[in-house]
Amino acid sequence: MRVVLAYSGGLDTSTILVLLRKKYNAEVITVTVDVGQEDELRDVEKRAYELGAIKHYTIDAKKEFVEEYIFRAIKANALYEGKYPLGTALARPLIAKKVAEIAKKEGADAVAHGCTGKGNDQVRFDITLKAFLDPEIKIIAPVRELRLTRSENIKILSEYGYKVSEIHKKYSIDENLWSRSIEGGEIDDPMAEPPEDAFSWTISPEKTPDKPLYIEIEFDKGVPVKIDGEKMDSVELIKFLNRVIGSYGYGRIDLIESRVIGLKSREVYEAPAALALIEAHSDLERMVLTPKELRFKRMVDEMWSDLVYQGLWIDPMRIHLENVIDSMNRYVSGISRLKIYKGSLYIVGRNSPYSLYSREIIDYNKGWYPSDAEARGFITIHSLYALMAKKVRGV
């Protein structure tokens, strides 16, 4: 049997590579999709061959990830349950699609992934693989099928002489350009403050510079294009913001999250660029969209975020929602000015050619001012139905 394995190089997929050869007697082709997970990419091909892969692919998909997935998330202000910027959820359908392409190319009998039966990623991988694979190609999930624990994985790899990094022994980590997630160990206690050794992208706010950082981000139709007036490559823009904003302690997320399968989990993330860009984008929207557009878009954004989190990237509803989101983002062009200090971020300025804000009108000291009659007329008409209901119902 020939199996194509979605291979991250971490604990679970390394264990699977061994088990596929040992338990399934399979020829294993490993595929690593580069979506910005810099630490895990070091020597990933070497590790794959050491554990018995007959062939390995490393696919650079960073630009596609940013421009076809992350930019869509920014335009949708995508924060699952108001906090999580969907880093892992966005990357999974792209990784699964690339793995499916290699499976077809290599004439594979099956595709394997390292997801457990408790997590969200099994849903995301299985659905997307089913959408892009030929029906005769099986999907294998050894960790789920054998109900393997992390300690069992460490034992299996140790027997084969594979050294597991101390950080992966302690935590389960998933990293890409948009976020770094940390699970396991002390973090599983919802009352325990995450220890500093769990973090890599962000510095403890107590250790950050004493002077604030100011950054201006320019958007064009909802997409970030410039930092402090300088046009930047899409991938480098995300990397830059992660590095600089993280060094000021901003970007940590700690929440109890509702997983797709119904479980509650304690999740800790680092996402400096994601949180900053979404905050800057949503603030600019408040300047250029009408009140009714804003209220409607909040509903659309939440629906889009839920679909992506639930692994339904292939759902046609996502396309319909994006048509609305793209239409509204035609006017989200301009600059947001950010102030980052000691782990906090503030929007301290904004400007847009489509701004609906008029200082001449809003200024209390000059310009247009409604007359008493105009104000009374507006208040009467605005409240007429509510006053009638109060009178009729008596409540």
Image (cartoon, rainbow, N blue to C red):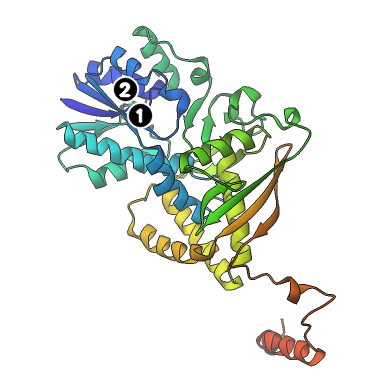
Taking the spot 55% from the left edge, 48% from the top edge, the residue there is 226
Q: In percent of the image, x 44 and y 44: which residue is there?
A: 66
Image quadrant occupied by the C terminus? bottom right
Q: How far apart are marks 2 and 1 (CA)?
A: 7 Å
Whole-percent x and y of residue 77? 53, 54
Residue kind at label 2, given as amino acid type: Ile
- Look at the numbered discs 2 and 1 and tell me whether their residues touch, using CB distance below 8 Å: yes
Q: Which of 48 and 172 is in front in this view?
A: 48
Place of residue 272 in the rendered image (x, y in percent of width and height, measured from the top left): 59, 39
Label 2 neighbourhood size at 10 Å, few (<14), some (14-19), many (20+)?
Answer: many
| Image quadrant where residue 120 sits | top left
Q: Is residue 305 above or below residue 254?
A: below
The secondary element bearing badge 2 is classed as: helix
Front in this rendered view, residue 4 or 219 = 219
Name the one closer to the observer, 283 or 100: 283
How many numbered circles are shown? 2
Q: Residue at x 53, y 27 (%)?
A: 184
- Residue 366 visible somewhere in the drawing: yes
Residue 200 image-quadrant placement: top right
The numbered mark at residue 26 is none
Secondary structure beneath disc 1?
loop
Query: Which residue type carries mark 1?
Result: Gly
- Image side of residue 335 versus residue 297, left or right: right
Q: Which residue is drawn at 66% across and 33% down?
A: 191
Residue 16's label in the rendered image is 2
- Image mark for residue 114: 1
Kindly tell me whether residue 393 is visible in this rendering.
no
x then y, percent, for residue 90: 43, 44
Label 1: how many Cα within 10 Å (few below 14, some 14–19, many 20+): many
Percent from the top left, x then y, of residue 252? 62, 37
Work out whether mark 2 precedes mark 1 in sequence or the reverse, and give the earlier one: 2
